[in-house]
Amino acid sequence: SESPLGTFWQTPMFLCVCVSELEVRQQRGGLLQGTLLLTVSDPQEPGLGSGGATLNALLVAAEHLSARAGYTVVTADVLDDAHILILHTGRDFPWDSCGRAFCWLPVEKPAQTVQGPVCCLDMLLDCLSNQVCPGSPPGVWVCSTDMILTMPTTFKMSWEGFSGVRVLALPGDVSYAANHGVYFADEQGRVRDIIYKGSEERIRRAAQPDGMVPLVSGPVFFCRRVLERLLKAHVTPPLDGCTYMGMDSGAPPIQVCSLHLYFSFLILIFFTSLCERTGLTMEDTERHYSPYGYVSFYVVHHSLYMPNVPSYYKWFISVFGFLLAVYVPGGCYDYLTLSGREHIGRLTKKGTERDTLSHIQVPYWQWRSVVLEGDVSVASGAVIQHCHLQGPVDVHSGCLLSGLEVTSSSHIQQLALTNDHIIQGHHIQLGEMKITVYTVLGAYDDLKVIFHQLNGRTDLWGSGRSQSLMEARLFPVFQPRGGAVGLEVGVCWLLGGPGALEQWRAVWRLSLREVLSLTDQEGELRWREALFFQVGRRRVMDNLKSQSDRGLLPSFRAAVLGGQHEELLCTLDSIAAGSGENLGVAARCLACIADVLACLAGEGRGGLRSGPAANPAWSHAFSILEQGDLLGGVQALATERAKWLSRPDLLVRAARHYEAAGQVLLRQAVMLSQRFIYIGQGEVPPLGEWQDVECPARLDLSGGWSDTPPIAFEHGGVVVNVAVKVDGRRPIGARARRIKEPRLLLVSSSGVQDDAIAMETVCERLEDLKDHCVPYAPAALLKAVCVCSGLVTYPSRQSLDEQLLQRWGGGVEIHTWSLLPHGSGLGTSSILAGAVLAAVYRCTGRTYDTDSLIHAVLHLEQMLTTGGGWQDQVGGLVGGVKVARSKACLPLRVEVERLPLSDDFLLSLQQHLLLVYTGKTRLARNLLQDTVRRWYSRVPSIVENAGQLVDNAEECARACSLPRLGACLERYWGQKKVMAPGCEPAAVRTMMDALRPLALGQTLAGAGGGGFLYLLTRQPQQGEAVRQVLNNTQGLRDFSVHPVELDMDGISLLKSS
């Protein structure tokens, strides 16, 4: 489920369990904030039973609710709108020291926003909160945590008119049911009997139409009316002895062995209805019930009995209702038994959601709870959990290793392990002393079997103890003079290693049951948590170095919540500093550090992620990075970072500067494409001779965003686009000539001739080019061209006039123009950069090819710090319809292929394409910054969408009909909206909705957000029809409709003048 667990449980919600780990889940978002969590221990141990524990937990919940509501006594009125969940953690579990509830499972939860282990408890909470309990009226759900429930996705319970007690029954086969409880119910679901470990004949009587039988499966619901009667038990002898309040009031402890929820409480409800229906007396039912546990049944019956109430049975039914069972066909009930073999099978079971990594021999982790170093070989069907091991170690099939520290590795290496061994390390507490005890068992060992043939072996069992494997004192703890025993003494000898029987007999030993009862649960959980974070850091390292698409934000959030951010930041610093051979990895590391800092600030605190990042305090670190000193730059950034960790606003500002530092490295990585720029030297034209260049605009048909660094070289990009004239003209152009004066005269104009706006900039000193990398500086693009093309060198010891005279015999005058509005989405700036480069190359007598121009523009835009991809210059410099690709590697190289389309198809395409100017100006830089951030974070929707963009582009390249092309356009627009949420203004949405009946497909050009919309119409020559539809649509203004003409030539060099 993508929603937080516990969305059903309205405040207040009570989880009455014995472990405070629930608070960790609440911090990680697994349980809603504001939900009240209570941990309740049984007032009488052992022997209180699930029924007695439920009464005590209910009382504690009601007491807290009453206090919150301002009452001074416990009142049932607070239960009127309460949704309460009581979870029992149950008995010891031999295969996990923390019990069944916190037994880790090999389950990945892709929707987790904060990474954490998935335990049996988590799966149960997920199932209850999102499938079983929603819709139920106010009341209490009670459930154990010793099983895994799996519900069909279509499951839904009806609660209309319900009152009473309801139980959930999942299907099981007869052989499985022989060791469990089974409900026997009529056609209306009313329970007639509960069969526990019954004969096959009795069990088959409960069979359902699907041939399965309804198992006693855990969840029980008590409605509000029933709760009030149960709550009164805390002042009713002898049940008051079950509650802490009764014990504190001097009530004697309950004297029966245990009060079972099912066989003391639920059985009473169905037998009462039996008495009312058949005329039997309760004494008759008590005699009938004796096989189940007569004493506990009798205690509950007589505690709830109302002797002065006429028609007692009818009254009881009016309060408790009938016991109703809900059978769930297709569900699955998996009880965690004492069988080691079953548990190993559960952990290695293959499935869509439950998939162990135990086959993978990797240097670091086995699950998220394991660190493996060196030559550790793990056979199929083996499990390693909560371990840190160093090889060489061979783990055979059917084995389970758990809780082993790295110091155990040398002893494990000496063992002659075979299949089906279970070796565990347990953190226990003996008084003030905390030690680790090691146990070894076989996967097929029966822990409950009685060894009658060993009667009298008091050294193993002591007097009066059950002579079972669970009770046998096999496992060494202390040597008489040597202190605590390690793995090498006990386990090694039991498995045939060095040692002697006399030595084993001499040490103080514990049984498995004693070990489990002495578990230091807090210490065990902290050990697992520390290992979890250690594995998390190694996992981050591996993912970054291998350039994996796995999202790391959940790991970062977990580390921050767990107070492990300093270790994580150091890990990221180390990876970044060591990634000189792949600057793309280093850039992503700095972006990851920015994410960690933002997590430290807190969600929505400290300000917006996007913002200025040129604080002088960071300039030293930036300058070191710019000089190519990666190690020094990373260290300088870390030094400065330490001063910005005290407040949320400082953390967010630091995150912005780390993103800017990452952009420095990203630019350096993309600039490696300079090696694909081939410039020759030819004859230099005479002074004053203009070199004129014109270019078409481009329409991106599919794949845009996949061309954007770092996506283009980390994932690989594919774009299909087409060069077009707008209103019959190539809208972008440049001209350049050499002039006598040693200066740079830069003139840029925009708009049509009558309304053109021109800006002139004169550079007479080298200092005038200082702002060539500031994108919003006057004539920044033309200044960047002058530096990038080698027209001049900046910085340099030579003055500007000296350079110009020495190289070109004078200065250069450059003019540019664009007939398109700002933010058109038609690739204007990149195409214009290509046109200016071409004009400057020609006026200085240099030769080039189109591929070189494409990569030169890519290099120039990195120098200009505007970023952006390569598809714009491809679209305007190469004519016709083409597909361009870049591979997932550095250096970034773009390869362009003209699509061999027929003249008839091209003519039809031209007749069906229309441009509509929306009147909205887009701000692509904001969109670009947000998208790159989400890509670096590997947000799953972005990663998936990047693949779909490439797939759609390849499909578009194969499209041989307008309907197929239109379908690609529609998919493309949806993909753009995923990549850049907010790229569809409301007015544009209105416009597209109005035009949908006329269009096979439509999308905003470029990144979206405004500019031009283009559509592929169903009929040819639809300009007037489109104009009419838009004129008749309310709320639209400032739009214009433009015809499109395909340009098959691309960049065009006009006759010199």
Image (cartoon, rainbow, N blue to C red):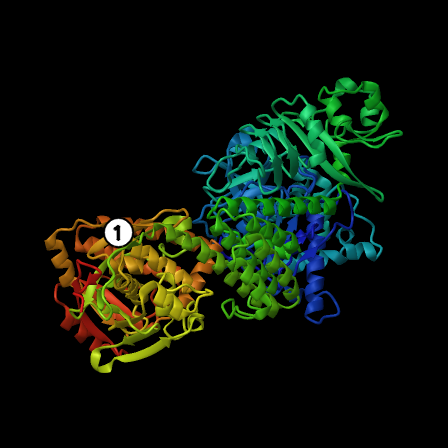
Front-lying residue, 250 or 37? 37
What is the total number of numbered labels drawn onto the structure image? 1
Q: Is residue 802 left or right of 340 when viewed as pictured?
A: left
**Kind of element beneath mark 1:** strand
Disc 1 crowd rating (10 Å Cα; few below 14, some 14-19, many 20+) is many
Front-lying residue, 999 or 959? 959
Decide: is 557 above or below 152: below
Residue 443 coordinates in the image, percent (x, y): 63, 27
Residue lying farthest to the top in this orientation: 453
The answer to whether any part of residue 796 appears in the image is: yes
Quarter location, residue 85: bottom right
Residue 151 coordinates in the image, percent (x, y): 49, 46
Q: Is residue 779 left or right of 319 when viewed as pictured?
A: left
Name the quadrant of the C terminus: bottom left
Residue lying farthest to the left in this orientation: 904
Q: Which residue in the protein does label 1 denote?
A: 883
Residue 100 coordinates in the image, percent (x, y): 64, 41
Q: Is residue 509 left or right of 690 when viewed as pictured?
A: right
Quarter location, residue 505: top right
Decide: is 1055 above or below 250: below
Q: Residue at x 74, y 67 (%)?
A: 73
Quarter location, residue 867: bottom left
Q: Amino acid at mark 1?
A: Val
Front-lying residue, 284 or 22? 22
Decide: is 600 above or below 739: above
Residue 584 coordinates in the image, percent (x, y): 47, 51
Residue lying farthest to the bottom in this orientation: 754
Front-lying residue, 497 or 338? 497
Decide: is 776 above or below 8: below
Q: Residue at x 57, y 70 (%)?
A: 616
The answer to whether any part of residue 136 appears in the image is: no
